[in-house]
Amino acid sequence: MKLQNSFKILSAVTLSASMLMVVPAHAQHHGHGMHHGHGMHGGAEKGFQKAVKHANFMPTLMRTAMDNQAVLALTSSQINALNNYHKQNSSSQRADMMKVIKLERLAAEFAKNGNLEDAQIAGQESIAIRQTIFNQKLRCHVFMQTILSASQYEQLRRLAD
C-alpha cells in the first residue's frame, strides 16, 4: 500500500512538472545554459540573489534595461514607465522567489523524514509558484515590447543573453 501511494505521489509530481514545463532541478541549481537576473537594486542582498538564481530561469529584462539605459537610448518617458512597472510588480516576485526556496527546503526535509505526502504538497506549492514567476517574466517581456521600439527590444534581448 505504501509503495502504491509513493508511486501515485511520484506520478503526480512528474506529471505536474512536465505539464508546467519546469526546468530540471539540476539546471536550476547549476545554471546550465541559463541567464539569471539579480533583482532591481544594484547591491541586492545575497539571499535574494541566491533565490533569483534558484527560482528563476527566464532572462531578466528589467535589470538589463535599467543597467543599459544609455546603450538602449531610453527616453525619460520609457525610463519612467519601466520604473513604474517595476514598482508595481517586483515585491510580489521577490516574495515568490523566497517562497520557492523555503518550500523546496521544506519538501526536502519532509522527504528525508519519510513524510512523502507533505513533501508532495510542498513540492506542488513550489511548482505553482514557479509557474507564477514564469508568467510574471512573460508579462514583463510583453510589457517591454510595448514600451520599447522594435530595435530597442531586439538589442535588449541580445544584451540579456
Image: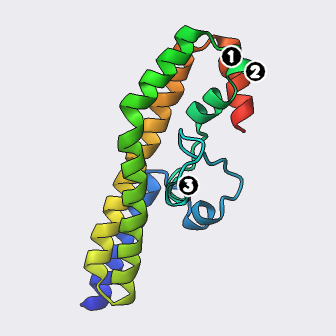
* Residue depth check, mark 1 versus mark 3: number of the one nearer the observer: 3
- If you read the primary sequence from the N terminus, does the residue marked by circle 2 or circle 1 appear first? 2
In the displayed structure image, the side of residue 30 where residue 39 appears, left or right? left
**Kind of residue indicated by mark 1:** Gln
Residue at the image position 55 percent from the left and 49 percent from the top: 44
Secondary structure found at label 3: helix
State the residue position of label 3: 49
Residue at the image position 55 percent from the left and 13 percent from the top: 78
- If you read the primary sequence from the N terminus, does the residue marked by circle 1 or circle 3 appear first? 3
Work out whether 158 lies above or below 28.
above
User: In the depicted view, which residue is nearer to us: 19 or 36?
Assistant: 36
* Residue depth check, mark 2 versus mark 1: number of the one nearer the observer: 2
In the displayed structure image, the side of residue 148 where residue 109 appears, left or right? left
**In which quarter of the view is residue 156 placed?**
top right
State the residue position of label 1: 152
State the residue position of label 2: 71
- If you read the primary sequence from the N terminus, does the residue marked by circle 3 or circle 2 appear first? 3
Q: Residue furthest front?
A: 43
Residue at the image position 61 percent from the left and 9 percent from the top: 75
- Across and down, in percent, residue 113 comes to 34, 90
Cα distance in 3D space between marks 1 and 3: 27 Å
Cα distance in 3D space between marks 3 and 2: 25 Å
Cα distance in 3D space between marks 2 and 1: 9 Å
**In which quarter of the view is residue 161 placed?**
top right
Q: Residues within 10 Å of mark 1 (few under 14, many from 20)?
A: some
